[in-house]
Amino acid sequence: MSWTELVMGAAPTRGDQPAVTDVRTGEVLSHAAFARRVTRAAAGLRRHGLRYGDRVLVDVPLGAGFAVAVHAVAWSGGVAVLGSRGVARMMVVHRRLDPAAEVDRVFSLEPVPGATPFAELIGEQTVEFGPLAGPALGVAGGRVLHHDELADDLRELSARFVLGKDDVVLAAVSDLVKGLRVLDLALMSGAHVVIAQEPTLTGCRVLAHEHAATLAVAPFELARRLVGDPSLRVVDERALAGSLAL
């Protein structure tokens, strides 16, 4: 089972139950909607000429759109490179295009002059079977991770951080890679992840109360200050490093 297939695995049973709440945009994405957008956007990327192994820059803030963009690229056979600069076949941006990006095609979550709306990638066609192996994710330092190692590491994390379908995870992490790992772990487990925007101690406490969070993942100092609520497990984000040392 590939990385993205593992992440989408709970969709058939969790259906319309919430998967990602994006505090920044107010969007709530269900497990079924996540899988649907990923497989249809992957088809759209192929329709626009993405080939196996092509690099796609992903310059999108952590949230529902970020998760869809990264996994749509991976499911289409491309390599989702987290960043705004460099040479790539395509790019997915939020609302700004970095002039240092050398790409053939740009898709944007919000209107950007010269870019194609990301929503136009999502049609009726789907990619039913994504790649089982090969490159999938590019991170800092030019490191490229493959589907099999990402999937194996996610399984290892899930064995250490047991999540269930009734868990609500507050993601108050400090960078995109850690955020992606929290998203992957929660989606795979059928849980609900709430993405905090510029998290503060007060903001996290409010979000944890509003969404009845059962687990919070945060940098050490913030995690230390969140400890004390008996209904909330708190995890230092460094514990998500896993075997890949991300």
Image (cartoon, helix red, strand yellow):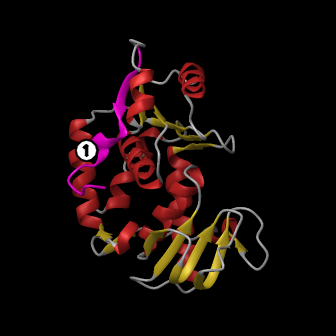
Assess whether residue 196 is covered by the magenta stretch.
no
Q: Residue at x 41, y 29 (%)?
A: 223
Residue 164, percent from left and from top: 34, 31
Q: Residue at x 68, y 65 (%)?
A: 119
Picture quadrant of residue 204:
top right
Residue 139 visible at all = no
Element under disc 1: helix
Q: Which quarter of the image is occupied by the C terminus?
A: bottom left
In the image, 161 versus 71, the foreground residue is 161
**How many dots with numbers?**
1
Name above or below for residue 90 compared with residue 195: below
Q: Residue at x 37, y 50 (%)?
A: 9
Residue 33 visible at all = yes
Name above or below for residue 246 compared with residue 200: below
Q: Label 1: how many residues lie within 10 Å, few (<14), some (14-19) or many (20+)?
A: some
Viewed as shown, does residue 1 lie left or right of 185? left
Identify the amino acid type marked 1: Leu
Residue 233, percent from left and from top: 36, 23
Residue 111, percent from left and from top: 78, 66
Q: Which quarter of the image is occupied by the N terminus?
A: bottom left
Question: Which residue reaches farthest front?
Answer: 221
Residue 67, percent from left and from top: 51, 55
Name above or below for residue 20 compared with residue 77: above
Name above or below for residue 79 compared with residue 180: below
Q: Which residue is mark 1?
A: 157
Viewed as shown, does residue 163 lie left or right of 72? left
Viewed as shown, does residue 173 lie left or right of 22? left
Chain part drawn in magenta: 231-246
